[in-house]
Image (cartoon, rainbow, N blue to C red):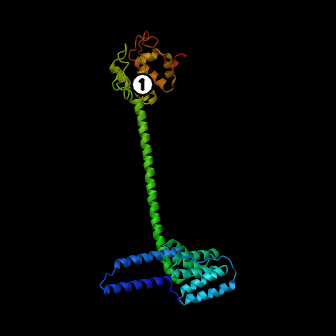
């Protein structure tokens, strides 16, 4: 009777062990480390041999009678424990005629017992291609994946399907263990999803917070540009416009005294008007232009543009009225209190700036 590959390997190991025992009796080294290295090498060679092991596949021929005889011979050899003889007969049966799913499944069982796991899995694949409901092929491949191929998820799928076709109590215990693994895996996957979702949520919150901070900074910068860009303030206008306006109106003949200007700039209407950044920007432009407000009076086109603005015009007209109410600015002809314009004790003698003629 032939020895299969596993039996042959065991015989070799036993022979090597007996040699080491004889060497030790003669006073030599046992060489345990060398033996272990040889064992590892033998195991590697066995694994490599399994990976490279292949069986013949059908090519042509339709001798079904011969195939039937060979299948019976193979079954007898397998039942008597002659796995190598069974494999040889199954190989010849596969070559004799187109093999059935059952023939592939039976050969895969012998291959699995001989340690040729990849070849056994391939035969299961051929069997299931012919008959997807082959319980024998599903069970054989499921056991291969579970015990030898480190594919417990594939094993769970195969064995679950096999049980639905042909219940096997021996498979039930394996399925319980595989189901526990599946539950543990699903818990891990759920935890990973939760962690990823939490990380994404925090990232989204961070982006939203950063955008809000950037928007707030931009708004603050815009306010600073409109309100805080006029340092120094008007001489004689303490506590006036927020942020101050550059000097230029102080010292002009007929300018109201500082106390009067302070009171004017605290006027609720003036304060309300100066809350508009556009108004503040217009007054800044007036104060920073050559000649300051006096230069504006000599530029009727610019004056008309400002007075025609629906936001700036009313504020400018209000400011001028408040200023004129303090005694006027003599020497600036054409405007109340400024060169020939009577001192405006009331608003009745002040021309409405909105009614100025079109200067274009």
Position of residue 88 in the picture relative to residue 199 (left or right) = right
Quadrant into which the C terminus falls: top right
Residue pictured at 45% horizontal, 10% vertical: 333
- In front: 318, or 333? 333
- Residue 292 visible to an observer of this rendering: yes
Q: Measuring 49% from the left and 80% from the top, which residue is drawn there? A: 173
Give the vertical position of 260 relative to 191 (above or below): above
Q: Position of residue 186 (x, y in %)?
A: 48, 67
Furthest toward the right, the residue is: 62
Residue tagged by mark 1?
A: 284
Q: Quick one: which residue is furthest to the left in this view?
A: 27
The image position of residue 313, as x and y in percent, is 48, 23
| Image position of 264 with respect to 189: above or below | above
Q: Where, by quadrant of the figure, is residue 273 drawn?
A: top left
Q: In front here: 73 or 218?
A: 73
Q: Is residue 102 visible?
A: no
Locate residue 320 relative to residue 102 in the image: left or right.
left
- What x and y, as percent, mark residue 136? 58, 80
Label 1 sits on a secondary structure element that is helix
Residue that extends furthest to the top in the rendered view of this protein: 340
Q: Position of residue 285 (x, y in %)?
A: 44, 23
Q: Nearer the viewer, residue 9 or 68?
A: 9
Residue drawn at x 47%, y 12% is 334
What is the count of numbered marks?
Answer: 1
The quarter of the displayed image where residue 106 is located: bottom right
Quadrant in the picture for residue 239: top left
Neighbourhood count class around disc 1 (C-alpha, 10 Å): few under 14, some 14–19, many 20 upward? many
């Amino acid at each position: 009777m032939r020895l299969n590959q596993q039996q042959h390997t065991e015989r070799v190991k036993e022979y090597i062990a007996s040699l080491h025992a004889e060497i030790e009796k003669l006073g030599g080294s046992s060489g345990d480390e060398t033996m272990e290295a040889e064992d590892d090498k033998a195991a590697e060679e066995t694994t490599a041999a399994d990976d490279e092991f292949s069986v013949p596949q059908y090519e042509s021929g339709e001798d079904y009678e011969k195939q039937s005889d060979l299948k019976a011979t193979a079954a007898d050899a397998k039942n008597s424990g002659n796995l190598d003889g069974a494999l040889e007969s199954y190989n010849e049966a596969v070559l004799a005629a187109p093999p059935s799913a059952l023939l592939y499944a039976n050969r895969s069982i012998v291959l699995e017992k001989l340690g040729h796991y990849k070849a056994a899995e391939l035969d299961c694949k051929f069997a299931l291609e012919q008959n997807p409901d082959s319980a024998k092929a599903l069970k054989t491949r499921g056991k291969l994946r579970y015990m030898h191929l480190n594919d417990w998820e594939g094993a769970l799928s195969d064995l679950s399907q096999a049980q639905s076709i042909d219940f096997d109590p021996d498979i039930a215990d394996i399925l319980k263990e595989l189901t526990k693994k599946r539950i543990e895996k699903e818990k891990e996957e759920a935890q990973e999803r939760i962690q990823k979702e939490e990380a994404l949520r925090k990232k989204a919150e961070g982006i939203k917070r950063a955008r809000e901070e950037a928007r707030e900074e931009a708004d603050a910068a815009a306010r600073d540009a409109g309100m805080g860009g006029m340092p120094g303030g008007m001489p004689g206008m303490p506590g006036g416009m927020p942020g101050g306006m550059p000097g230029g109106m102080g010292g002009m003949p007929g300018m109201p005294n500082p106390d009067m200007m302070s009171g004017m700039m605290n006027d609720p209407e003036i304060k309300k008007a100066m809350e508009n950044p556009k108004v503040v920007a217009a007054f800044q432009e007036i104060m920073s232009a050559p000649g300051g407000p006096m230069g504006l009076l000599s530029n009727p086109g610019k004056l008309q543009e400002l007075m025609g603005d629906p936001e700036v015009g009313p504020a400018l007209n209000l400011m001028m009225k408040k200023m004129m109410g303090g005694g006027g600015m003599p020497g600036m002809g054409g405007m109340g209190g400024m060169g020939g314009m009577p001192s405006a004790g009331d608003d009745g003698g002040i021309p409405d700036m909105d009614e100025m003629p079109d200067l274009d």
